[in-house]
Image: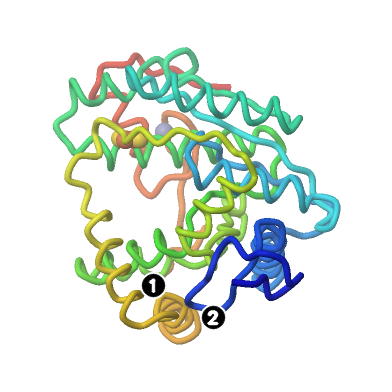
């Protein structure tokens, strides 16, 4: 098996593209595709500061690595932001991996501890709130990441959502008939109303390629599953997508194209605009109701709420 780019020994074969590449050329191919995605969807204007939501897992670690390598070509400034969720036996590993990667690359990193900065942990949520931990945790992460990225002067928050994550989320929202969620699953959301821009530079990259990239680039990431993720339905959706892809190589890309080019434009009207947002009367962050979801979670746990500066 020969590398299509250099003629040397190929290390990987990408069925969907009918392409075989050696390690070096795979890394280049991967990075070029991410750069193309960023340009195609005008994710990052030159001079912008992009804050990478770094968990210490495979996707966000690979994303940080690529963006760091592309930063001068793209003309952007790159920083990393990690939220320490305070999940015992889990968060330490992830925060440790995030620190190690940033130290190795020389990327400025800010770690925000939910416990010391906001007075509670996700373990507290699990103990005291009856609602599904994962969805509360999602709310918490979105809130803290946006707030801290904005405070750091970031133009955009970049997350590691890959092609498979996006398609799994599309299918889940489709099953629920959640039009609002579908309307927000695109590659980029503009800044405004207290939100920094949100971008997904890996949205056109299959999860398997992210795994290979992390391995070839020598990225040490954590593979431990979150103790609260048991039974998460996204795994089933991803397995179904892999089955489809095995039978029909390229179908994942086709699904993404159909979704972004045909369905999303039709759903544009369902996307809540920033102007429709109020401010949370407790914390001042953008909110659809008088008290935002984050503050409601804190209230349920019994955190004494005070104004954050
Ligand atoms: Fe948030 Fe698992 S990482 S609940
Ligand atoms: Zn609030």
Q: What percent of the width, then of the height, locates residue 283?
A: 46, 30
Query: Is 211 situated above or below 171?
Result: above
Please tell me how many numbered marks the rendered image carries: 2
Measuring from the top left, give residue 94's x and y in whole percent.
47, 27
The residue carrying mark 1 is 270
Question: Which residue occupies 32% across, 17% down?
Answer: 88
Find residue 191 and report its image quarter.
Answer: bottom right
Q: Earlier in the sequence, mark 1 or mark 2?
A: 2
Mark carried by residue 97: none
Question: Residue shown at 36%/41% (left/top)?
Answer: 138
Residue 275 or residue 218, whichever sits in front: 218
Viewer-side residue, 165 vs 306: 165
Neighbours of disc 1 within 10 Å: few (<14), some (14-19), many (20+)? some
Q: Position of residue 120 (x, y in %)?
A: 36, 17
Left/right of residue 253 with respect to residue 127 in the rendered view: right
Residue 153 lies, in percent from the top left, at 72, 38
For mark 2, what is the residue? 18
The scheme the figure's colours follow is: rainbow
């Amino acid at each position: 098996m020969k590398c299509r780019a250099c003629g040397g020994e190929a290390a990987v074969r990408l069925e969907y593209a009918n392409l075989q590449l050696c390690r070096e050329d795979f890394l280049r191919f991967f990075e070029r595709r991410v750069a193309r995605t960023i340009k195609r969807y005008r994710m990052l204007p030159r001079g912008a500061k992009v804050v990478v939501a770094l968990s210490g897992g495979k996707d966000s670690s690979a994303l940080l690595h690529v963006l760091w390598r592309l930063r001068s070509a793209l003309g952007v400034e790159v920083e990393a932001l990690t939220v320490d969720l305070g999940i015992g036996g889990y968060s330490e590993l992830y925060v440790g991996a995030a620190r190690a990667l940033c130290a190795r690359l020389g990327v400025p990193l800010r770690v925000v501890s939910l416990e010391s900065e906001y007075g509670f942990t996700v373990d507290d949520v699990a103990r005291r709130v009856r609602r599904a931990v994962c969805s509360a945790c999602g709310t918490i992460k979105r809130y803290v990441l946006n707030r801290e990225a904005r405070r750091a002067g970031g133009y955009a928050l970049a997350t590691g959502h890959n092609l498979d994550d996006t398609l799994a989320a599309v299918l889940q929202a489709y099953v629920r008939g959640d039009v609002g969620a579908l309307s927000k699953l695109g590659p980029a959301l503009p800044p405004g109303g207290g939100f920094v821009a949100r971008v997904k530079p890996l949205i056109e990259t299959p999860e398997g390629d992210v795994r290979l990239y992390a391995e070839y680039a020598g990225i040490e990431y954590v593979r431990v599953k979150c103790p609260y993720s048991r039974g998460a339905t996204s795994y089933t959706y991803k397995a179904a997508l892999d089955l489809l892809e095995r039978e029909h190589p390229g179908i994942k890309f086709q699904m993404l194209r159909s979704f972004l080019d045909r369905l999303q434009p039709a759903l544009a009207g369902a996307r809540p605009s920033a102007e429709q947002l109020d401010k949370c009367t407790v914390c001042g962050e953008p909110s659809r109701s008088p008290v935002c979801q984050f503050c409601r979670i804190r209230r349920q746990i019994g955190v004494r709420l005070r104004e954050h500066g």
